Amino acid sequence: MKTIMFFLLLSAVPAVAADMTGVWNVDGSVEDHPVTPVCTLKQAGAKLTGSCKFDEEHAASDVAGEVKGKEVSWKFTVEYQGTQYTLTFTGTMDSDRSIKGSISVDPSGSDGDFTAKKQ
């Protein structure tokens, strides 16, 4: 009986969300175009801040986002061929070091998928 009560108590304890703070390697694709930024994120409560950078030729872009349990989203703006694009990443943490989800790009209306791994 004590064993049953122990397991019931454990099942009532809410799961703690993993901390998103760290460097994330994103590997995604939007309409057959690779989307591979390295994002340095900082989590404070439910809020995400930081930056994402595609390569040495492009400046880092500021990130704004949020975390709700295992659900995470962040976005940033980049310039490509004279047009400003906002990339929004929405995903689910499948471990404390891995995210899978979707990318939406505005104003083009394009979308795709991504995975991200914490360094």
Image (cartoon, helix red, strand yellow):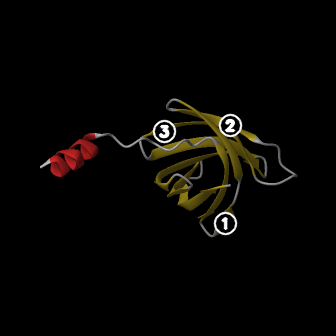
Q: Earlier in the sequence, mark 2 or mark 1?
A: 1
Q: Amino acid at mark 2?
A: Gly
Q: Which quarter of the rendered picture does the C terminus lie within?
A: bottom right
- Of tags 2 and 1, the one toward the viewer is 2
- Give the CA distance from mark 3 to mark 1: 27 Å
Q: Secondary structure at mark 3?
A: strand
Q: Residue at x 82, y 43 (%)?
A: 59
Query: What residue is disc 3 on?
Result: 67
Horizontally, residue 12 falls left or right of residue 19, namely: left
Q: Residue at x 16, y 47 (%)?
A: 2
Q: Amino acid at mark 3?
A: Val
- Give the CA distance from mark 2 to mark 1: 24 Å
Q: Amino acid at mark 1?
A: His
Q: Quadrant of residue 44?
A: top right
Q: Position of residue 106 (x, y in %)?
A: 58, 47
Query: What residue is disc 1 on?
Result: 33
Q: Earlier in the sequence, mark 3 or mark 2?
A: 2
Badge number at residue 50: 2
Query: Mark 3, residues whose alpha carbon is within 10 Å: few (<14), some, or many (≥20)?
Result: many
Count of numbered circles in the view: 3
- Give the CA distance from mark 3 to mark 2: 14 Å
